[in-house]
Image (tube, helix red, strand yellow):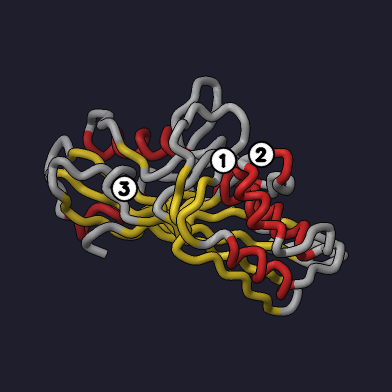
């Protein structure tokens, strides 16, 4: 039986999801738990690569069960063997050819900014504190120009070997509540560090270091040096992955 599990994790203590040599990762902890549960170590397929320090509220993983366990029993069964900062909260049966990454229709990320001169003791590990005043309306105007189908090469960090850099952004919202600014983006796919660079560019617009309308020029340039800095990892959270059945 092939299953899809959905999990949450606090990425503070991990070097991303994907297994790496000489680095502590979420996938390693998950596979350790699965090995203790099944007696063998099944290969797993994650929905996305995540950088060190990035969090997830709805990360999806698919794998073939070495022995059948009913999906409704899987979350509690796996959680017995996971550390407290990783939790599986849902599971369902999927077709054999299903792949958590390549079968996805869209992915949503949330990026949290604390626009304050003082850090929040309880939320500091989940947000980027920007002390300079930010114009939320200017950020919204810049974000709107990133929506649609574009070549996002200007928002890809070096080191990626991806050739096709065209992606479709379904929505890119910026909402403010007090000192907290939440950037919520949904797209059919992302380039390496794309969301963090987009957010860094929105902050440039919000701080009035660039005009919001310049976002269109940055996109058209396909030049990484024209975009903003890469926002810190801790503010980013994989919020939701959508499939044809969700």
**SS at circle 3:** helix
**SS at circle 2:** loop
Residue occupying the point 61% across, 50% down = 219
Tags 1 and 2 in contact by the CB under 8 Å rule?
A: yes
The picture quadrant where one finds residue 209 is bottom right
Q: Residues within 10 Å of mark 2 (few under 14, many from 20)?
A: some
Can residue 236 be seen at all in this image of the molecule? yes
On the image, numbered disc 1 is attached to which residue? 153
Q: Position of residue 180 (x, y in %)?
A: 70, 71
Alpha carbon of mark 3 to alpha carbon of mark 1: how far? 39 Å
Q: Earlier in the sequence, mark 1 or mark 2?
A: 1
Which of the numbered marks, if any, corresponds to residue 78?
3
Q: Nearer the viewer, mark 2 or mark 3?
A: 2
Q: Position of residue 64 (x, y in %)?
A: 19, 38
Q: Is residue 181 left or right of residue 149?
A: right
Alpha carbon of mark 1 to alpha carbon of mark 2: how far? 7 Å
**SS at circle 1:** helix
* Residue nearer the viewer, 27 or 204: 204
On the image, numbered disc 2 is attached to which residue? 223
């Amino acid at each position: 039986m092939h299953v899809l599990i959905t999990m949450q994790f606090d990425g503070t203590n991990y070097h991303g999801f994907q297994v790496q040599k000489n680095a502590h990762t979420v996938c390693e902890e998950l596979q350790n738990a699965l090995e203790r549960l099944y007696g063998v170590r099944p290969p797993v397929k994650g929905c996305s690569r995540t950088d060190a320090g990035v969090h997830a509220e709805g990360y999806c993983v698919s794998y073939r069960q070495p022995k059948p366990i009913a999906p409704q029993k899987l979350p509690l069964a796996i959680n017995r063997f996971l550390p407290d900062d990783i939790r599986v909260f849902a599971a369902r049966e999927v077709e054999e050819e299903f792949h958590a990454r390549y079968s996805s229709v869209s992915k949503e990320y949330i990026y949290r900014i604390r626009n304050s001169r003082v850090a929040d003791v309880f939320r500091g590990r989940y947000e980027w504190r920007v002390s300079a005043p930010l114009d939320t309306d200017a950020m919204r105007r810049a974000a709107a120009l990133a929506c649609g189908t574009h070549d996002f090469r200007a928002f890809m960090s070096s080191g990626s070997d991806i050739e096709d850099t065209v992606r479709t952004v379904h929505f890119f919202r910026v909402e403010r509540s007090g000192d907290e600014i939440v950037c919520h983006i949904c797209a059919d796919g992302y380039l390496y560090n794309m969301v963090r660079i987009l957010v860094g560019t929105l902050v440039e617009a919000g701080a009035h270091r660039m005009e919001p309308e310049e976002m269109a020029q940055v996109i058209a340039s396909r030049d990484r040096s024209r975009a903003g800095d890469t926002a810190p990892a801790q503010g980013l959270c994989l919020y939701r992955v959508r499939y044809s059945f969700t």
